[in-house]
Amino acid sequence: MSCPQPLTAEEKLADAKKLLSLPPVVVICGSTRFMTEMNEADLRETAAGKIVVKPGCDMKSPHELWSDPAEAEALKVRLDDLHRAKIRLADEVLVVGDYIGDSTRTEIAYARSQGKPVRFTHAEVDPDA
């Protein structure tokens, strides 16, 4: 008689989402230079019935939280970790913008390594296309 394998954390999360009848979760990725486009994507995805998570800080705009360079670098590390957590939480990824920088390229690779479907507002920028 074989013992059933315990569920992975990802399987437990998927089961919990089903039990709670949660709508799909989409995470928006991309350069923060596209914050206006991210807000529009958020609106459209929300109107389509999805829960949307996206970058919460635009470090390209001045703010006291990242005015000190050392604090800004530490914050960037924490925000990158937080965004990877958002990717793990999400059911799919939407990449916004017509430019893919190193950070976004890393996020796309991470999402795909987690088995997350990745969509693009500009399909031509898909690094794996």
Image: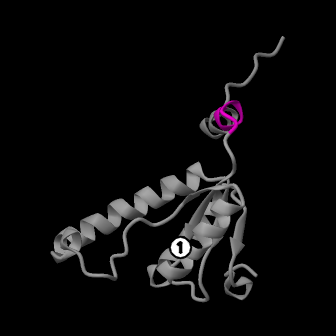
Look at 48% across and 75% down and name the residue there.
Answer: 103
Percent from the top left, x then y, of residue 32?
45, 79
Find residue 27 and report its image quarter.
bottom right
24, 1: nearer the viewer: 24
Residue type of the residue flagged with mark 1 = Asn
Q: Is residue 89 left or right of residue 4?
A: left
Find residue 63 and report its image quarter.
bottom left
The colour scheme applied to this rendered structure is one colour
The number of numbered badges drawn on the structure is 1
Q: Quadrant of the C terminus?
A: bottom right
Q: Is residue 128 above or below residue 9?
A: below
Mark 1 lies on a secondary structure that is helix
34, 125: nearer the viewer: 34
Look at 25% across and 65% down and name the residue there.
Answer: 74
Q: Is residue 67 above or below residue 3?
A: below
Q: Is residue 103 left or right of residue 110?
A: left
Q: Which residues are magenta?
A: 16-21
